[in-house]
Amino acid sequence: MYNASDLRKGLKILIDKEPYVVVDFQFSKPGKGQALYRCKLKNMISGIQIDRTYRSVDTFESANLEQRKMQYLYNQDDLFYFMDVQTYDQVFLTAAQAGEAKNFLIDNLEADVLLFDNRPIGITLPNFVDLKVVKADPWAKGDSVAGDSKPVTLETGYTLRVPPFVEEGNKITVDTRTGEYVTRVK
């Protein structure tokens, strides 16, 4: 159990039997009366944000969340299927639940899937993944408009800007947190 004084950014709590994460938090103590805690909360299942104000006597349950190592299998329509590496159970995430992570999912990639009451609600990828370049336009020397980078398309369909020496068929390392090019794989 948490008290209102335990609220802080990133804390995961249960409200109306659904998991919420504290996105923003402000404490205020009026001249007289109880202290107030103003919070912006984000529903971890639907993504909806709400504003709530709590008094210092309010209490909260912690959200029953679990992270499991799972292996990405495939996607069908807007569903992304994963397999638990220990129990071989399969679960799926919707495109909305996968978010930006869907741009970096390749077969057999291991990731941490966040579960709430054994229902998958989110995913955390490794910080870096190696992806193959499937489309890269040739870079024209002296092309000062584009600067020192050019757009390429990766095997997942994701497009990003890379240095001019990266060619079609190369493997590159991409930072999954920012979606930016890191280095070319030897």
Image (cartoon, rainbow, N blue to C red):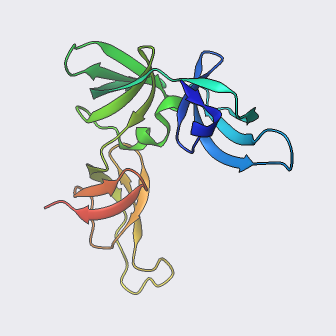
- Name the residue at 26% across, 33% down: 107
- Name the residue at 32% across, 45% down: 155
In the rendered image, residue 115, in percent from the top left (x then y), is placed at 42, 22
Q: Residue furthest left?
A: 186
Q: In the rendered image of this protein, does residue 120 appear above or below residue 126?
A: above
Q: In the rendered image of this protein, does residue 121 appear above or below residue 156?
A: above
- Name the residue at 34% across, 38% down: 105
In which quadrant of the rendered image does the C terminus lie?
A: bottom left
Q: Is residue 17 left or right of residue 123?
A: right
Q: Is residue 5 left or right of residue 74?
A: right
In the rendered image, residue 44, in percent from the top left (x then y), is placed at 56, 29
Q: Quadrant of residue 8?
A: top right
- Name the residue at 27% across, 58% down: 168
Q: Is residue 108 left or right of residue 8?
A: left
Q: Nearer the viewer, residue 41 or 159?
A: 41
In the rendered image, residue 22, in percent from the top left (x then y), is placed at 60, 39
